[in-house]
Protein backbone atom coordinates (compact mmCIF):
# COMPACT_ATOMS: atom_id res chain seq x y z
CA UNK A 1 0.00 0.00 0.00
CA UNK A 2 1.35 3.40 -0.96
CA UNK A 3 2.04 6.15 1.52
CA UNK A 4 -0.90 8.16 0.14
CA UNK A 5 -3.28 5.19 0.49
CA UNK A 6 -2.14 4.55 4.06
CA UNK A 7 -2.59 8.23 4.85
CA UNK A 8 -6.11 8.22 3.38
CA UNK A 9 -6.97 5.13 5.44
CA UNK A 10 -5.74 6.78 8.63
CA UNK A 11 -7.65 9.98 7.91
CA UNK A 12 -10.85 8.03 7.27
CA UNK A 13 -10.26 6.07 10.48
CA UNK A 14 -9.81 9.31 12.41
CA UNK A 15 -12.89 10.95 10.95
CA UNK A 16 -15.04 7.82 11.08
CA UNK A 17 -13.48 5.23 13.42
CA UNK A 18 -14.32 1.54 13.21
CA UNK A 19 -16.30 1.55 16.45
CA UNK A 20 -18.76 4.00 14.83
CA UNK A 21 -19.55 1.43 12.14
CA UNK A 22 -20.04 -1.23 14.77
CA UNK A 23 -22.52 0.99 16.62
CA UNK A 24 -24.41 1.79 13.42
CA UNK A 25 -24.71 -1.91 12.61
CA UNK A 26 -26.40 -2.52 15.99
CA UNK A 27 -29.01 0.20 15.50
CA UNK A 28 -32.42 -0.65 14.07
CA UNK A 29 -33.78 1.53 11.29
CA UNK A 30 -37.47 0.78 12.08
CA UNK A 31 -36.57 1.13 15.76
CA UNK A 32 -35.28 4.68 15.26
CA UNK A 33 -38.29 5.67 13.18
CA UNK A 34 -40.89 4.19 15.54
CA UNK A 35 -39.08 5.50 18.64
CA UNK A 36 -39.24 9.07 17.33
CA UNK A 37 -42.91 8.71 16.34
CA UNK A 38 -43.83 7.21 19.71
CA UNK A 39 -41.92 9.98 21.48
CA UNK A 40 -43.69 12.64 19.42
CA UNK A 41 -47.12 11.15 20.10
CA UNK A 42 -46.42 10.95 23.85
CA UNK A 43 -46.03 14.73 23.97
CA UNK A 44 -49.58 15.34 22.78
CA UNK A 45 -52.09 16.20 25.54
CA UNK A 46 -54.20 13.60 27.33
CA UNK A 47 -56.57 14.16 30.28
CA UNK A 48 -54.37 15.59 33.04
CA UNK A 49 -51.73 18.35 32.85
CA UNK A 50 -48.26 16.86 33.29
CA UNK A 51 -45.20 18.22 35.02
CA UNK A 52 -41.85 17.94 33.26
CA UNK A 53 -40.78 14.90 35.30
CA UNK A 54 -44.03 13.01 34.66
CA UNK A 55 -43.92 13.89 30.97
CA UNK A 56 -40.25 12.90 30.82
CA UNK A 57 -40.96 9.46 32.30
CA UNK A 58 -43.87 8.93 29.92
CA UNK A 59 -41.86 10.04 26.88
CA UNK A 60 -38.87 7.91 27.90
CA UNK A 61 -41.07 4.84 28.18
CA UNK A 62 -42.66 5.69 24.83
CA UNK A 63 -39.23 5.97 23.23
CA UNK A 64 -38.34 2.55 24.59
CA UNK A 65 -41.65 1.02 23.47
CA UNK A 66 -41.26 2.39 19.95
CA UNK A 67 -37.66 1.28 19.64
CA UNK A 68 -38.51 -2.15 21.05
CA UNK A 69 -41.33 -2.60 18.56
CA UNK A 70 -39.02 -1.58 15.72
CA UNK A 71 -36.34 -4.04 16.85
CA UNK A 72 -38.95 -6.80 16.98
CA UNK A 73 -40.15 -6.01 13.45
CA UNK A 74 -36.54 -6.01 12.23
CA UNK A 75 -35.95 -9.37 13.92
CA UNK A 76 -39.13 -10.80 12.37
CA UNK A 77 -37.98 -9.64 8.93
CA UNK A 78 -34.65 -11.41 9.41
CA UNK A 79 -36.29 -14.51 10.88
CA UNK A 80 -38.44 -14.83 7.75
CA UNK A 81 -35.20 -14.73 5.75
CA UNK A 82 -36.30 -11.76 3.68
CA UNK A 83 -33.59 -9.77 1.83
CA UNK A 84 -31.65 -7.21 3.89
CA UNK A 85 -29.39 -4.26 3.14
CA UNK A 86 -25.64 -4.55 3.00
CA UNK A 87 -23.67 -3.20 5.95
CA UNK A 88 -22.70 -0.06 4.03
CA UNK A 89 -26.26 0.66 2.89
CA UNK A 90 -27.57 -0.12 6.37
CA UNK A 91 -25.19 2.38 7.96
CA UNK A 92 -26.19 5.10 5.50
CA UNK A 93 -29.90 4.45 6.12
CA UNK A 94 -29.32 4.51 9.89
CA UNK A 95 -27.76 7.96 9.56
CA UNK A 96 -30.71 9.16 7.46
CA UNK A 97 -33.25 7.61 9.84
CA UNK A 98 -31.40 9.05 12.84
CA UNK A 99 -31.38 12.51 11.31
CA UNK A 100 -35.08 12.30 10.50
CA UNK A 101 -35.81 11.05 14.00
CA UNK A 102 -33.88 13.95 15.51
CA UNK A 103 -35.88 16.44 13.46
CA UNK A 104 -39.18 14.87 14.55
CA UNK A 105 -38.10 14.89 18.22
CA UNK A 106 -37.03 18.55 18.13
CA UNK A 107 -40.15 19.74 16.30
CA UNK A 108 -42.49 17.98 18.69
CA UNK A 109 -40.48 19.07 21.74
CA UNK A 110 -40.97 22.65 20.58
CA UNK A 111 -44.72 22.01 20.31
CA UNK A 112 -44.97 20.25 23.72
CA UNK A 113 -45.29 23.47 25.72
CA UNK A 114 -48.30 24.66 23.73
CA UNK A 115 -50.01 21.27 24.01
CA UNK A 116 -49.61 21.14 27.77
CA UNK A 117 -50.91 24.68 28.08
CA UNK A 118 -54.11 23.80 26.22
CA UNK A 119 -55.06 21.49 29.11
CA UNK A 120 -53.88 23.96 31.73
CA UNK A 121 -56.00 26.68 30.16
CA UNK A 122 -59.09 24.43 30.31
CA UNK A 123 -58.40 23.76 34.00
CA UNK A 124 -57.47 27.38 34.80
CA UNK A 125 -53.86 26.60 35.71
CA UNK A 126 -50.68 28.58 35.21
CA UNK A 127 -48.90 27.75 31.90
CA UNK A 128 -45.59 25.87 31.88
CA UNK A 129 -42.41 27.85 31.29
CA UNK A 130 -40.11 27.82 28.28
CA UNK A 131 -37.65 25.36 29.85
CA UNK A 132 -40.30 22.63 30.01
CA UNK A 133 -39.13 20.85 26.80
CA UNK A 134 -35.48 20.84 27.89
CA UNK A 135 -36.18 19.30 31.29
CA UNK A 136 -38.53 16.65 29.96
CA UNK A 137 -36.12 15.79 27.15
CA UNK A 138 -33.28 15.11 29.59
CA UNK A 139 -35.51 12.99 31.81
CA UNK A 140 -36.82 11.06 28.81
CA UNK A 141 -33.27 10.30 27.66
CA UNK A 142 -32.37 8.99 31.12
CA UNK A 143 -35.48 6.80 31.31
CA UNK A 144 -34.85 5.46 27.80
CA UNK A 145 -31.23 4.63 28.67
CA UNK A 146 -32.30 2.81 31.84
CA UNK A 147 -34.97 0.86 29.96
CA UNK A 148 -32.51 -0.02 27.21
CA UNK A 149 -30.03 -1.29 29.81
CA UNK A 150 -32.67 -3.61 31.28
CA UNK A 151 -33.53 -4.85 27.78
CA UNK A 152 -29.86 -5.53 27.05
CA UNK A 153 -29.59 -7.47 30.31
CA UNK A 154 -32.60 -9.56 29.28
CA UNK A 155 -31.00 -10.20 25.88
CA UNK A 156 -27.74 -11.31 27.48
CA UNK A 157 -29.61 -13.70 29.76
CA UNK A 158 -31.46 -15.20 26.79
CA UNK A 159 -28.19 -15.73 24.92
CA UNK A 160 -26.49 -17.22 27.98
CA UNK A 161 -29.23 -19.80 28.50
CA UNK A 162 -29.58 -20.58 24.78
CA UNK A 163 -25.84 -21.08 24.27
CA UNK A 164 -25.68 -23.56 27.13
CA UNK A 165 -28.64 -25.52 25.75
CA UNK A 166 -27.41 -25.70 22.15
CA UNK A 167 -25.04 -28.48 23.11
CA UNK A 168 -28.02 -30.75 23.72
CA UNK A 169 -31.00 -29.48 21.69
CA UNK A 170 -31.63 -27.73 18.32
CA UNK A 171 -30.74 -24.05 18.02
CA UNK A 172 -34.23 -22.61 17.63
CA UNK A 173 -35.62 -24.73 20.44
CA UNK A 174 -32.82 -23.52 22.71
CA UNK A 175 -33.70 -19.92 21.77
CA UNK A 176 -37.35 -20.43 22.71
CA UNK A 177 -36.42 -22.03 26.03
CA UNK A 178 -33.93 -19.21 26.63
CA UNK A 179 -36.67 -16.61 26.19
CA UNK A 180 -39.09 -18.49 28.44
CA UNK A 181 -36.45 -19.02 31.12
CA UNK A 182 -35.44 -15.34 31.02
CA UNK A 183 -39.07 -14.21 31.30
CA UNK A 184 -39.47 -16.51 34.31
CA UNK A 185 -36.34 -15.11 35.97
CA UNK A 186 -37.33 -11.48 35.37
CA UNK A 187 -40.90 -12.13 36.55
CA UNK A 188 -39.63 -13.85 39.68
CA UNK A 189 -37.44 -10.85 40.44
CA UNK A 190 -40.22 -8.35 39.75
CA UNK A 191 -43.02 -10.25 41.49
CA UNK A 192 -41.11 -12.00 44.23
CA UNK A 193 -38.62 -9.31 45.13
CA UNK A 194 -39.52 -5.84 43.83
CA UNK A 195 -43.32 -5.99 44.13
CA UNK A 196 -43.42 -8.09 47.29
CA UNK A 197 -40.78 -6.00 49.02
CA UNK A 198 -42.39 -2.81 47.74
CA UNK A 199 -45.84 -3.82 48.95
CA UNK A 200 -44.50 -4.88 52.34
CA UNK A 201 -42.63 -1.62 52.71
CA UNK A 202 -45.69 0.38 51.64
CA UNK A 203 -47.88 -1.66 53.96
CA UNK A 204 -45.64 -0.93 56.96
CA UNK A 205 -45.25 2.73 56.03
CA UNK A 206 -48.93 3.43 55.55
CA UNK A 207 -49.83 1.42 58.64
CA UNK A 208 -47.48 3.54 60.75
CA UNK A 209 -48.87 6.67 59.12
CA UNK A 210 -52.45 5.60 59.80
CA UNK A 211 -51.95 5.22 63.56
CA UNK A 212 -50.65 8.77 63.88
CA UNK A 213 -53.10 11.36 65.15
CA UNK A 214 -54.48 13.71 62.54
CA UNK A 215 -52.86 17.15 63.04
CA UNK A 216 -55.12 19.52 64.95
CA UNK A 217 -57.74 16.87 65.72
CA UNK A 218 -58.79 16.66 69.36
CA UNK A 219 -60.74 13.88 71.00
CA UNK A 220 -64.40 14.94 71.22
CA UNK A 221 -66.08 15.28 74.60
CA UNK A 222 -69.66 15.04 73.31
CA UNK A 223 -70.87 11.48 74.10
CA UNK A 224 -72.69 11.41 70.74
CA UNK A 225 -69.38 11.75 68.90
CA UNK A 226 -67.48 8.67 67.79
CA UNK A 227 -64.12 8.55 69.55
CA UNK A 228 -65.39 10.16 72.77
CA UNK A 229 -65.00 8.40 76.12
CA UNK A 230 -68.59 7.15 75.76
CA UNK A 231 -67.99 5.76 72.25
CA UNK A 232 -67.61 2.06 71.45
CA UNK A 233 -64.71 3.01 69.15
CA UNK A 234 -61.71 4.41 71.04
CA UNK A 235 -60.09 7.59 69.79
CA UNK A 236 -56.68 5.94 69.57
CA UNK A 237 -56.13 3.54 67.86
CA UNK A 238 -59.72 2.60 67.04
CA UNK A 239 -60.38 5.55 64.74
CA UNK A 240 -56.99 5.90 63.11
CA UNK A 241 -55.80 9.01 61.31
CA UNK A 242 -58.53 9.04 58.65
CA UNK A 243 -61.26 8.39 61.18
CA UNK A 244 -60.10 11.24 63.41
CA UNK A 245 -60.04 13.48 60.39
CA UNK A 246 -63.54 12.53 59.32
CA UNK A 247 -65.36 12.78 62.67
CA UNK A 248 -63.76 16.09 63.65
CA UNK A 249 -64.42 17.85 60.34
CA UNK A 250 -68.19 17.69 60.66
CA UNK A 251 -69.91 21.08 60.86
CA UNK A 252 -71.74 21.81 64.08
CA UNK A 253 -75.47 22.32 64.34
CA UNK A 254 -74.74 25.90 65.30
CA UNK A 255 -72.81 26.50 62.06
CA UNK A 256 -75.52 24.91 59.95
CA UNK A 257 -78.26 26.78 61.80
CA UNK A 258 -76.48 30.11 61.34
CA UNK A 259 -76.48 29.58 57.59
CA UNK A 260 -80.07 28.32 57.44
CA UNK A 261 -81.28 30.94 59.92
CA UNK A 262 -83.10 28.14 61.68
CA UNK A 263 -82.44 25.53 64.34
CA UNK A 264 -80.25 22.65 63.21
CA UNK A 265 -78.86 19.51 64.80
CA UNK A 266 -75.27 18.37 65.09
CA UNK A 267 -74.74 15.84 62.29
CA UNK A 268 -73.62 12.41 63.46
CA UNK A 269 -70.54 10.77 61.98
CA UNK A 270 -69.51 7.21 62.82
CA UNK A 271 -66.18 5.78 61.72
CA UNK A 272 -64.72 2.36 62.50
CA UNK A 273 -60.99 2.08 61.86
CA UNK A 274 -59.04 -1.06 61.05
CA UNK A 275 -57.67 -1.23 64.58
CA UNK A 276 -61.09 -1.08 66.23
CA UNK A 277 -61.68 -4.84 65.81
CA UNK A 278 -59.92 -7.90 64.43
CA UNK A 279 -62.24 -9.04 61.65
CA UNK A 280 -64.43 -7.51 58.98
CA UNK A 281 -67.56 -8.93 60.61
CA UNK A 282 -66.63 -7.50 64.00
CA UNK A 283 -66.00 -4.05 62.54
CA UNK A 284 -69.31 -4.11 60.66
CA UNK A 285 -71.15 -5.15 63.81
CA UNK A 286 -69.36 -2.45 65.80
CA UNK A 287 -70.53 0.15 63.28
CA UNK A 288 -74.15 -0.89 63.78
CA UNK A 289 -73.82 -0.89 67.56
CA UNK A 290 -72.30 2.60 67.51
CA UNK A 291 -75.17 3.83 65.30
CA UNK A 292 -77.64 2.36 67.76
CA UNK A 293 -75.81 3.85 70.73
CA UNK A 294 -76.13 7.40 69.38
CA UNK A 295 -79.71 6.86 68.12
CA UNK A 296 -78.67 7.41 64.50
CA UNK A 297 -81.77 5.61 63.24
CA UNK A 298 -83.88 8.40 64.72
CA UNK A 299 -82.43 10.85 62.20
CA UNK A 300 -84.22 11.54 58.93
CA UNK A 301 -81.23 10.56 56.74
CA UNK A 302 -78.62 7.81 57.07
CA UNK A 303 -75.65 7.59 54.68
CA UNK A 304 -73.46 4.49 54.27
CA UNK A 305 -70.16 5.95 53.06
CA UNK A 306 -67.56 3.53 51.70
CA UNK A 307 -64.03 4.97 52.06
CA UNK A 308 -61.29 5.02 49.46
CA UNK A 309 -58.43 2.55 49.71
CA UNK A 310 -56.56 4.42 52.42
CA UNK A 311 -59.70 4.90 54.50
CA UNK A 312 -60.41 8.46 53.44
CA UNK A 313 -63.98 9.77 53.34
CA UNK A 314 -64.16 13.14 51.60
CA UNK A 315 -65.83 15.58 53.98
CA UNK A 316 -66.46 17.86 51.00
CA UNK A 317 -68.89 15.19 49.80
CA UNK A 318 -70.68 14.63 53.13
CA UNK A 319 -70.88 18.22 54.43
CA UNK A 320 -73.28 19.39 51.66
CA UNK A 321 -75.70 16.59 52.59
CA UNK A 322 -75.52 17.68 56.23
CA UNK A 323 -76.42 21.25 55.28
CA UNK A 324 -79.17 20.20 52.87
CA UNK A 325 -80.92 18.31 55.70
CA UNK A 326 -80.29 20.72 58.53
CA UNK A 327 -77.93 18.38 60.36
CA UNK A 328 -80.66 15.77 60.76
CA UNK A 329 -78.37 13.09 59.35
CA UNK A 330 -76.00 10.32 60.38
CA UNK A 331 -73.10 8.97 58.28
CA UNK A 332 -71.21 5.74 58.89
CA UNK A 333 -67.98 4.49 57.32
CA UNK A 334 -65.82 1.44 58.00
CA UNK A 335 -62.16 1.29 56.99
CA UNK A 336 -60.88 -1.73 55.08
CA UNK A 337 -57.34 -0.63 54.17
CA UNK A 338 -54.74 2.05 54.82
CA UNK A 339 -53.12 1.72 51.39
CA UNK A 340 -53.86 4.09 48.49
CA UNK A 341 -56.62 2.79 46.26
CA UNK A 342 -54.34 1.49 43.47
CA UNK A 343 -52.16 -0.37 46.00
CA UNK A 344 -55.23 -1.66 47.81
CA UNK A 345 -56.48 -3.12 44.52
CA UNK A 346 -53.17 -4.94 44.07
CA UNK A 347 -52.63 -6.17 47.62
CA UNK A 348 -56.07 -6.71 49.15
CA UNK A 349 -58.74 -6.02 46.56
CA UNK A 350 -61.24 -8.38 48.20
CA UNK A 351 -61.19 -6.55 51.56
CA UNK A 352 -63.04 -3.48 50.31
CA UNK A 353 -65.68 -5.61 48.63
CA UNK A 354 -66.17 -7.84 51.67
CA UNK A 355 -66.22 -4.93 54.13
CA UNK A 356 -68.78 -2.95 52.13
CA UNK A 357 -71.03 -6.01 51.90
CA UNK A 358 -70.71 -6.76 55.62
CA UNK A 359 -71.50 -3.17 56.64
CA UNK A 360 -74.46 -2.96 54.29
CA UNK A 361 -75.82 -6.30 55.52
CA UNK A 362 -75.64 -5.20 59.17
CA UNK A 363 -77.08 -1.70 58.71
CA UNK A 364 -79.67 -2.57 56.07
CA UNK A 365 -80.73 -5.66 58.03
CA UNK A 366 -81.53 -3.51 61.06
CA UNK A 367 -82.98 -0.64 58.99
CA UNK A 368 -85.54 -2.75 57.13
CA UNK A 369 -86.90 -4.10 60.43
CA UNK A 370 -87.88 -0.58 61.51
CA UNK A 371 -91.34 0.84 60.72
CA UNK A 372 -91.21 2.35 57.24
CA UNK A 373 -92.69 5.66 58.40
CA UNK A 374 -90.20 6.04 61.27
CA UNK A 375 -86.86 4.96 59.86
CA UNK A 376 -84.42 7.29 58.06
CA UNK A 377 -83.98 7.54 54.33
CA UNK A 378 -81.00 5.28 53.49
CA UNK A 379 -78.36 6.37 50.95
CA UNK A 380 -75.07 4.94 49.73
CA UNK A 381 -71.99 6.98 48.89
CA UNK A 382 -68.51 6.24 47.58
CA UNK A 383 -65.65 7.94 45.77
CA UNK A 384 -63.24 6.14 43.44
CA UNK A 385 -62.52 2.67 44.88
CA UNK A 386 -65.17 3.49 47.47
CA UNK A 387 -67.70 3.90 44.66
CA UNK A 388 -66.74 0.52 43.22
CA UNK A 389 -67.07 -1.25 46.57
CA UNK A 390 -70.28 0.62 47.42
CA UNK A 391 -71.79 -0.58 44.13
CA UNK A 392 -70.90 -4.14 45.12
CA UNK A 393 -72.24 -3.87 48.66
CA UNK A 394 -75.90 -4.41 47.83
CA UNK A 395 -77.40 -7.31 45.91
CA UNK A 396 -80.39 -6.15 43.84
CA UNK A 397 -82.34 -9.31 44.66
CA UNK A 398 -81.89 -8.73 48.39
CA UNK A 399 -83.19 -5.16 48.37
CA UNK A 400 -85.72 -5.04 45.57
CA UNK A 401 -88.59 -5.77 47.96
CA UNK A 402 -87.57 -2.94 50.29
CA UNK A 403 -85.08 -0.74 48.42
CA UNK A 404 -82.82 1.90 49.92
CA UNK A 405 -83.50 5.45 48.80
CA UNK A 406 -80.57 6.08 46.49
CA UNK A 407 -76.83 6.38 45.95
CA UNK A 408 -74.24 8.92 44.90
CA UNK A 409 -71.11 7.43 43.35
CA UNK A 410 -68.40 9.87 42.28
CA UNK A 411 -65.39 9.11 40.12
CA UNK A 412 -66.39 5.47 39.50
CA UNK A 413 -63.27 3.52 38.49
CA UNK A 414 -63.12 1.95 35.04
CA UNK A 415 -63.22 -1.52 36.63
CA UNK A 416 -66.80 -1.00 37.79
CA UNK A 417 -68.92 -3.56 35.97
CA UNK A 418 -72.17 -1.81 36.85
CA UNK A 419 -70.94 1.54 35.55
CA UNK A 420 -69.59 -0.06 32.36
CA UNK A 421 -72.85 -1.88 31.67
CA UNK A 422 -74.93 1.25 32.17
CA UNK A 423 -72.62 3.32 29.97
CA UNK A 424 -72.66 0.64 27.27
CA UNK A 425 -76.49 0.62 27.26
CA UNK A 426 -76.85 4.41 27.09
CA UNK A 427 -79.00 6.22 24.55
CA UNK A 428 -77.07 6.31 21.25
CA UNK A 429 -77.34 10.11 21.03
CA UNK A 430 -75.68 10.65 24.42
CA UNK A 431 -71.87 10.76 24.79
CA UNK A 432 -69.94 8.16 26.79
CA UNK A 433 -68.77 10.84 29.23
CA UNK A 434 -72.38 11.90 29.99
CA UNK A 435 -74.66 8.93 29.26
CA UNK A 436 -78.41 8.92 29.45
CA UNK A 437 -79.66 5.57 30.68
CA UNK A 438 -83.12 4.40 29.67
CA UNK A 439 -85.88 6.72 30.92
CA UNK A 440 -83.72 8.33 33.64
CA UNK A 441 -86.02 7.17 36.44
CA UNK A 442 -83.29 5.28 38.32
CA UNK A 443 -79.82 6.30 37.08
CA UNK A 444 -78.58 9.69 35.94
CA UNK A 445 -75.17 11.19 35.24
CA UNK A 446 -73.78 14.65 35.90
CA UNK A 447 -70.49 16.55 35.86
CA UNK A 448 -69.34 20.14 36.43
CA UNK A 449 -72.69 21.36 35.14
CA UNK A 450 -75.92 20.09 36.64
CA UNK A 451 -77.44 17.65 34.13
CA UNK A 452 -79.81 15.96 36.57
CA UNK A 453 -82.95 17.87 35.65
CA UNK A 454 -84.32 15.97 32.66
CA UNK A 455 -87.50 17.52 31.33
CA UNK A 456 -89.17 14.36 30.07
CA UNK A 457 -88.12 12.06 32.94
CA UNK A 458 -89.48 11.45 36.43
CA UNK A 459 -87.48 9.96 39.27
CA UNK A 460 -88.55 6.59 40.63
CA UNK A 461 -88.45 5.45 44.29
CA UNK A 462 -84.66 4.82 44.10
CA UNK A 463 -82.36 7.56 42.78
CA UNK A 464 -78.80 6.79 41.68
CA UNK A 465 -76.43 9.50 40.46
CA UNK A 466 -72.96 9.12 38.99
CA UNK A 467 -70.86 12.26 39.38
CA UNK A 468 -67.98 12.03 36.91
CA UNK A 469 -65.70 14.42 35.09
CA UNK A 470 -64.80 13.78 31.47
CA UNK A 471 -61.17 14.47 32.45
CA UNK A 472 -61.09 11.79 35.17
CA UNK A 473 -58.60 9.08 34.10
CA UNK A 474 -59.65 6.78 36.97
CA UNK A 475 -63.04 6.58 35.28
CA UNK A 476 -62.10 6.69 31.61
CA UNK A 477 -58.90 4.68 31.45
CA UNK A 478 -59.35 1.51 29.44
CA UNK A 479 -56.76 -1.09 28.44
CA UNK A 480 -58.43 -1.40 25.04
CA UNK A 481 -57.04 2.06 24.20
CA UNK A 482 -53.95 0.05 23.25
CA UNK A 483 -55.59 -0.83 19.93
CA UNK A 484 -58.83 1.13 19.58
CA UNK A 485 -60.10 4.66 20.08
CA UNK A 486 -62.19 5.05 23.28
CA UNK A 487 -65.77 6.13 22.78
CA UNK A 488 -65.39 9.11 25.13
CA UNK A 489 -62.86 10.59 22.69
CA UNK A 490 -65.50 10.88 19.99
CA UNK A 491 -67.04 14.29 19.34
CA UNK A 492 -68.60 16.07 21.07
CA UNK A 493 -66.08 15.84 23.87
CA UNK A 494 -66.37 16.74 27.51
CA UNK A 495 -65.88 20.42 28.36
CA UNK A 496 -62.66 19.69 30.30
CA UNK A 497 -60.97 17.54 27.62
CA UNK A 498 -58.43 19.14 25.29
CA UNK A 499 -59.49 19.34 21.63
CA UNK A 500 -55.87 18.42 20.77
CA UNK A 501 -56.15 15.02 22.44
CA UNK A 502 -55.60 12.46 19.67
CA UNK A 503 -55.74 8.67 19.80
CA UNK A 504 -52.57 6.79 18.91
CA UNK A 505 -52.25 3.00 19.19
CA UNK A 506 -50.33 1.98 22.30
CA UNK A 507 -49.31 5.57 23.14
CA UNK A 508 -52.75 6.72 24.28
CA UNK A 509 -52.98 3.74 26.60
CA UNK A 510 -49.60 4.69 28.12
CA UNK A 511 -50.72 8.31 28.47
CA UNK A 512 -53.92 7.32 30.26
CA UNK A 513 -52.04 4.89 32.53
CA UNK A 514 -49.77 7.75 33.60
CA UNK A 515 -52.82 10.01 34.03
CA UNK A 516 -54.28 7.46 36.45
CA UNK A 517 -51.30 7.92 38.76
CA UNK A 518 -51.61 11.73 38.75
CA UNK A 519 -55.40 12.09 38.64
CA UNK A 520 -55.42 13.49 42.18
CA UNK A 521 -52.96 16.22 41.14
CA UNK A 522 -55.54 17.99 38.97
CA UNK A 523 -57.08 21.23 40.24
CA UNK A 524 -60.34 20.94 42.15
CA UNK A 525 -63.28 20.33 39.86
CA UNK A 526 -61.22 18.41 37.28
CA UNK A 527 -59.58 15.03 36.92
CA UNK A 528 -60.17 12.92 40.02
CA UNK A 529 -60.61 15.85 42.41
CA UNK A 530 -64.32 16.46 42.98
CA UNK A 531 -65.57 19.86 44.09
CA UNK A 532 -68.07 20.60 46.85
CA UNK A 533 -70.36 22.59 44.57
CA UNK A 534 -70.87 19.61 42.27
CA UNK A 535 -71.72 17.38 45.23
CA UNK A 536 -74.36 19.91 46.27
CA UNK A 537 -76.32 19.56 43.02
CA UNK A 538 -75.94 15.78 43.08
CA UNK A 539 -77.09 15.32 46.69
CA UNK A 540 -80.00 17.70 46.21
CA UNK A 541 -81.26 15.47 43.40
CA UNK A 542 -80.46 12.13 45.03
CA UNK A 543 -82.05 12.95 48.39
CA UNK A 544 -84.89 15.02 46.95
CA UNK A 545 -83.96 17.84 49.32
CA UNK A 546 -86.08 20.29 47.32
CA UNK A 547 -83.81 23.32 47.49
CA UNK A 548 -84.33 26.01 44.87
CA UNK A 549 -81.61 27.07 42.44
CA UNK A 550 -81.10 30.30 44.37
CA UNK A 551 -80.75 28.45 47.68
CA UNK A 552 -78.26 26.06 46.12
CA UNK A 553 -76.19 28.99 44.84
CA UNK A 554 -76.08 30.41 48.39
CA UNK A 555 -74.89 27.08 49.73
CA UNK A 556 -72.23 26.76 47.03
CA UNK A 557 -70.85 30.19 47.91
CA UNK A 558 -70.91 29.30 51.61
CA UNK A 559 -69.08 25.99 51.14
CA UNK A 560 -66.82 27.11 48.30
CA UNK A 561 -63.48 25.23 48.28
Image (tube, rainbow, N blue to C red):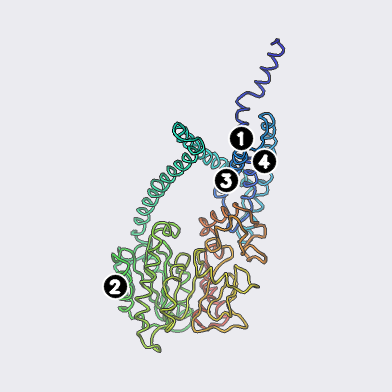
- Name the residue that disc number 4 marks: 101
- Camera-near label (3 vs 2) is 3
Give how far apart the Cα atoms at labels 1 and 2 are. 69 Å
Residue 518 as seen in the image, left or right of residue 313 = right
* Classed neighbour count for the residue bearing mark 1: other residues with Cα under 10 Å, few (<14), some (14–19), many (≥20): some
First-in-chain label (1 vs 4): 1
Q: Secondary structure at mark 4?
A: helix
Give how far apart the Cα atoms at labels 3 and 4 are. 15 Å
- Name the residue that disc number 3 marks: 65
First-in-chain label (1 vs 2): 1
Q: Secondary structure at mark 3?
A: helix
Give how far apart the Cα atoms at labels 3 and 2 are. 56 Å
Residue 316 as seen in the image, left or right of residue 471 = left
- Name the residue that disc number 1 marks: 27
Q: Who's the residue at 37% across and 66% down the image?
A: 335
Front-lying residue, 539 or 43: 43
State yes or no: discs 3 and 4 in contact (Cβ < 8 Å): no
Which residue is at the far right?
A: 4
How far from the left and from the top, in percent, is residue 5? Answer: 71, 14
Give how far apart the Cα atoms at labels 3 and 1 are. 15 Å
* Classed neighbour count for the residue bearing mark 4: other residues with Cα under 10 Å, few (<14), some (14–19), many (≥20): many
Residue 533: tell me if it is visible: no
First-in-chain label (3 vs 1): 1
Q: Secondary structure at mark 1?
A: loop
Amino acid sequence: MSVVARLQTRVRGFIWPGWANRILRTLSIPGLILASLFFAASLTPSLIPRTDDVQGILSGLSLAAGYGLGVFLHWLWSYLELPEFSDRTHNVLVLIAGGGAAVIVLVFLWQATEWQNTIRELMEQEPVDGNFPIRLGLIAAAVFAATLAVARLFQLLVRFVAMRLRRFIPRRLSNVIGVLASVAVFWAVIDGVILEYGLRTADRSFQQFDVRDFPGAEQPTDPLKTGSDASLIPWDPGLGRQGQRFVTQAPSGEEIGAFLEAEAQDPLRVYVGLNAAETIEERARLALEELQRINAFDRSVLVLATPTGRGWVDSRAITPMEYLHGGDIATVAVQYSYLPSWLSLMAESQYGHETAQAVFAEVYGHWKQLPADERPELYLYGLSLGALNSERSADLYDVIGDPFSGALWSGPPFRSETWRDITRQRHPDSPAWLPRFRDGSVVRFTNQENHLDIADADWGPMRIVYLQYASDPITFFEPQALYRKPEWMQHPRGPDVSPDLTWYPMITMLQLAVDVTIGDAAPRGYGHVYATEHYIDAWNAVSNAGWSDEELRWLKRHLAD
